[in-house]
Image: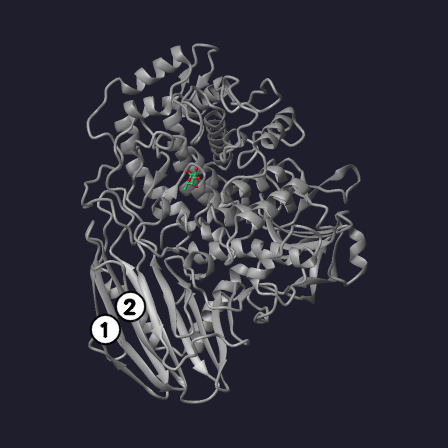
Amino acid sequence: MTPGISRRTTITSALGVTGALTLGVPAPSGTAATADPSDDSTLWYRTPAADWERESLPIGSGALGASVYGTLATERLTLNEKTLWTGGPGAASGYDHGDWSEPRPGALASVQQRLDTEGRLAPEAVAAELGQPKHGFGAYQVLGHLELAVPGAPTAPDPSYRRSLDIASAVAAVSYVHQGATYTREFFASFPGKVIAGRFWADSPGKTGFTLRYTSPRQDFTATASGDRLTVRGALQDNGLRFEAQIRVRADGGSVSAGADGTLTVSGADRAWFVLAAGTDYADTYPHYRGDDPHREVTHAVDAAAARPYESLRADHVSDHRALFDRVSLDIGQRLPDLPTDQLLSRYTGGTSPADRALEALFFQYGRYLLISSSRTGSLPANLQGVWNNVVDPPWSADYHVNINLQMNYWLAEVTNLAETTAPYDRYIESMRAPGRRSARRLFDSDGWVVHNETNPYGFTGVHDWATAFWFPEAAAWLTQQLYDHYRFGGSLGYLRSTAYPVMREATEFWLANLRTDPRDGTLVVTPSYSPEHGDFTAGAAMSQQIVHDLFTNTLEAARTLRTAGVRTEDPGFLSRLEDALGALDPGLRIGSWGQLQEWKADLDSRTDDHRHVSHLFGLHPGRQIEAGSAWAEAAKVSLTARGDGGTGWSKAWKINFWARLRDGDHAHTMLSEQLKGSTLANLWDTHPPFQLDGNFGATSGIAEMLVQSHHGPIEILPALPAVWPEGRVRGLRARGGVTLDIAWSGGLARRITVRASRTGDLTLRSTLFPGGEHTFRADARSTHVFPTAVFSTAEDG
Ligand code: FUC
């Protein structure tokens, strides 16, 4: 943990008294000492990696990624550039965005009519009417592999061998002793430097050398070496997307030479390092999705990095990463034993040991690390595998599934103080509007924008014909939730007006045009409606209704906020149309025959159903329609209990969030431990199986939800603390309303709450700390508010 430092701060007491008092506050971002390799933010191993999926260690700068998994003799980095995708315009099999190639007049109305009369339809029957074969969707491509063959390296690791990833400084390393010398390799991906960098050195001079080579599973490139530079250029066969990577090697002492076979060799150096830049001619602009040839930018990035001292490149990287990473610290009583991470994981029981706490705290921070590394301004958002992929045909194309997965990737972003990482998400959603409008017109003959079950970087907003996963027009509405939440957390009216609201409003237009009156009860319903990947098609499934309810509620709130602020956004009729529709909307909340929250409008739920999607609880999380303690929450608990504690990695992660929202900290912790025991690989990547990163992000979000919630307005402190975390403190979590919080607790109860507000206004805290359980006060944007006042008498931090 970053130690507190003592400084003079102006604080306002719980009683409203303002005074200058001395108290411990955490060190500002970026000033913490470099992590000790044995501290609680390092993953480390005693053996080289043999398996990419289970053992590689990921580094990334958002646009670029590498997974480090070499042996002693050959260090290996699998390389990624986030936009390297087949499919889209120019794809060999043609491309139509998933929109129907021919108009289908009456097709949608006929399915709706059949649902009115028959009540339910098999997914295959609906897919036959509304689906079409998928073509040109494409897949995320590995960029290639960087192999560094080290002459004379030992074949087997010595006992001092160590492979590590320090997630606080975002540096991966390998070290070992050989014939009396200590050898070290380290790697990082720099967001400010726009390069991946690596350095090899030994503690005695002249002993560093390697031959560096680029390899690829595709045959679509040329690799040429000249001087200290290796240039890889190519174009994907499928769609002609151009890509380029350049690597430059530098050495202190010794020599660097280029081979005719496209290799670079360093020999007899004291230290040697490389920098690598890569890019493609992808652009996120409909309809062509092509921009400039990457040559200029790649050359510029690699030359600028190669011209700098390695130390300064590294220092800039570390401070850029720490400026985000260090904002949050979590202490739940962890004590890291001298155990490599794979053993820490295999010995984990979810019990009371400080080693179990160490894994949980590490897993929490790892989700933050992975988001920082895979989602930075200037490229696409984090995909199903973040940015890391080692093949040409990854599972589910390593795409953007939007029936939960992409959304889950960003659940942690605001609450764990990484709001900047949502910029690529916003831009991606924004760029989906143009093709999404086209899909709305071609499939629904409607205004608004739409996207279905999964999408790619080329605006695939239509459908395909995998019967249980092709139809989910609610995705657009769900995707806007994060944009509105970004406003709720950060409070920027400019953002709400220019970025969030236009996207929300257009998604709202779509649903205003597409809800239908249910002839059975006169409510407005989504039809056809499909509870993701589960059951039959019906009208008005719970998730469909709850998502539209969420969208309408958010859009109304946003429009009123903007109107109050004097921003003209509306034709006068829009708000009243929206209010009327929300009033007539079936809210998607029904309690069924066995006390469960119904997944469908008719009572069709089976008690023995353990499907991984728990879609009908959307209103509990990530929605805010269901309040803890209500009858709906009780019914949700019945459903969740019936679904059980199993599931895929991301499903378990979602269940952490659900139980936290139900204020059952012990059950939330049970789900966290189920995820760690059954759905986490040795490198702490979540596994569906296979590897899929949404579970990491969802688990970090779930842990944050156990500590702070603010979706209903009041800020709930420690709403779901499990018995196994009786003492602890968290620093830097965010709550809606522009609030940053530190909380210290003991005996399972909050002892001190520190609030830093970014704007002046009333805030309500809910905590056992206050008589009656609640305290409302006027937060001052320039002050730190500490509760309770009694703590003022001591300079102790915590
Ligand atoms: C959703 C899930 C699957 C998988 C896929 C990528 O469709 O139902 O389990 O996670 O996304």
The local secondary structure at tag 1 comes to loop
In terms of secondary structure, where does tag 2 sit? strand
Residue 130 x, y percent position in the rendering? 29, 25
Disc 1 target residue: 262
Residue 214: which numbered mark, if any? Answer: 2
Question: Visible in this render: residue 569?
Answer: no
Which comes before the other along the chain, label 1 or label 2? 2
Q: What is the three-letter code of the residue carrying label 1?
A: Gly
Q: Position of residue 333 (x, y in %)?
A: 70, 57
Relative to 2, 94 lies left or right:
left
Three-letter code, disc 2: Tyr
> Where 200 sits versus 351, above or below?
below
Quote the CA–CA distance across marks 1 and 2. 8 Å
Q: Are marks 1 and 2 in contact (CB under 8 Å)?
A: yes
> Within 10 angstroms of label 1, few (less than 14), some, or many (20 or more) residues?
some
Q: Could you tell me if residue 163 is visible in this image?
A: yes
The residue carrying pointer 2 sits among few (fewer than 14), some (14 to 19) or many (20 or more) residues within 10 Å by Cα, namely: many
How far from the left and from the top, in percent, is residue 730? Answer: 65, 54
Residue 78 occupies quadrant: bottom left
Which residue is at a point 31% across and 74% down the rendered structure image?
Answer: 212
Q: Position of residue 398 (x, y in %)?
A: 36, 48
Q: Quadrant of residue 402?
A: top left
The quadrant of the rendering that contains the C terminus is: bottom right
